[in-house]
Amino acid sequence: MILDYNLIWENLPLYFNGALLTLKVLLISLALGLLLAIPLALGRVSRSPLINFPAWLYTYVIRGTPMLVQLFLIYYGLAQFEAVRQSVLWPYLSSATFCACLAFAINTSAYSAELLAGSLKSTPHGEIEAAKAMGMSRLTLYRRILLPSALRRALPQYSNEVLMMLQTTSLASIVTLVDITGAARTFSSRFYLPFEAFITAGLIYLVLTFMLVRLFKLAERRWLAYLAPRKH
């Protein structure tokens, strides 16, 4: 089988725009998801059932249901309610980009919260005792010691979550967004060349994955250097 490289080359601008949209959705979703994940993680490590249980229930429900179902509920499901269509939120909820970012942010917040909660629970006891010995309040302890330390140590696991979210953004094409996968679907339907269309999309995802892996490796080298074994 011979690939039609000329058609692929001619349609690279379509894929380029799709890649920009993919990165936009990914970055917005990750930023919102991380903002949600921090208070959720604090809730997960709280000893109070009134705080811990709602955070646990949220992460359990979100992690226990498929991402595609969550996206459909937000994009298609909410539109069936008259109150939603008449609300001030409708201009946003009628936007495919907004709904995709919202669904992805909710999804990644649950997974990220569990990662951060695990890091918080594994904080070395010596760090906590040292902070208390310096007279830090509980709020200051979390703000200056626990959260920064947990975020740093969660980097390797969080990098996997980011890569999974990159692949998950391909679902955005189902709600009419022309991301990388949407560009491939457009290419395929226009020229009836599905192999060329989706192999190109796959290669672009691989390039983006490689770039993200390298960025996280650099971040780990900078912020996790103190955890590396010392050379004698």
Image (spheres, grey):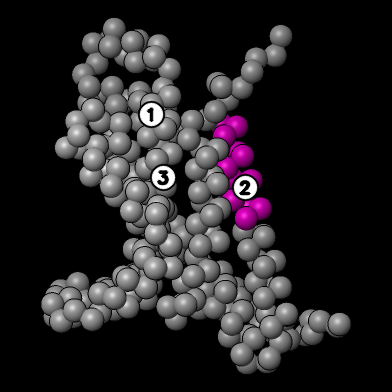
Residue linked to disc 3: 112
Q: Label 1 amino acid?
A: Leu
Q: Position of residue 108 (x, y in %)?
A: 41, 53
Depicted 110 relative to depicted 232: above or below: below
Cα separation, mark 3 vs mark 2, equals 17 Å
The mark closer to the camera, 3 or 2, is 3
Task: Report whether 29 appears left or right of 131.
Answer: right
Q: Which residues are magenta?
A: 209-222
* Among numbered discs 1 and 2, the one appearing first in the sequence: 1
Q: Residues within 10 Å of mark 2 (few under 14, many from 20)?
A: some
Q: Label 2 amino acid?
A: Val
Examine the rendering and report whether any part of residue 33 can be seen. no
Q: Label 3 amino acid?
A: Ser
Residue linked to disc 2: 213
Residue 120 marker: 1
Depicted 113 relative to depicted 192: above or below: above
